[in-house]
Amino acid sequence: EFYSHVLVGIGTTVEGIKDLARSFREAQVSLEVGKVFDTEKSIVSYDNLGIARLIYQLPTTLCDMFLKEVFKRGSIDNLDQETLFTIQKFFENNLNVSETSRKLFVHRNTLVYRLEKIKKLTGLDLREFDDAIVFKVALMVKKYLDSSPVKY
């Protein structure tokens, strides 16, 4: 049996043939952004790219500068896999400590301890919405830079 991985990019709907080229370019961007940010999806729509599309269009020098500003105390690379997994689950559960601890099968205090550890390492309190957004964007920027985009 032959299994192949197919990725489909969808541009915006257009009315006339004169806008077809723009929609095609959007579909291409959808494919490229999908390869970086939505690796599990096989169909990626331009309309649903959200902040990933914005990050993808940023110059890499600006992305590097952003990461240095956010992680003044140390690199995002200093976070181990367990910590990154905890953060991912915390975001998936809408910053809800009780729900996240239940999903991770850890005591609530264990999760609070991990979040405090992250705060000490990064200076960001992920229980605060603004800090959580900054951290989420930083993770996406890091993922983008790790995908080896063209430097400029």
Image: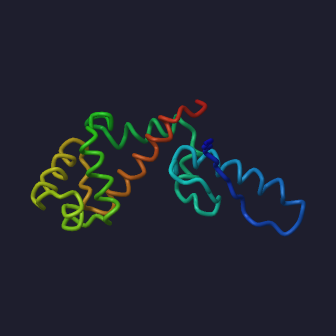
78 and 43: which is toward the camera: 43
Position of residue 113 in the picture relative to residue 7 (left or right): left
Q: Position of residue 126 (x, y in %)?
A: 26, 56
Residue farthest toward the right in the current orientation of the protein: 17
Quick one: quadrant of the C terminus? top right
Q: Is residue 100 above or below residue 3?
A: below
91 and 122: which is toward the camera: 91
Residue that appears at 19% across and 61% down: 101
Residue farthest toward the front in the current orientation of the protein: 1
Q: Position of residue 54 (x, y in %)?
A: 57, 52
- How many numbered marks, from 0 up? 0
Q: Position of residue 76 (x, y in %)?
A: 32, 38
Position of residue 82 in the picture relative to residue 107 (left or right): right
Instruction: Determine the image quadrant of residue 75.
Output: top left
Residue that appears at 60% across and 45% down: 5
Position of residue 139 in the picture relative to residue 127 (left or right): right
Instruction: Determine the image quadrant of residue 130.
Output: bottom left
Quick one: quadrant of the N terminus? top right
111 and 132: which is toward the camera: 111
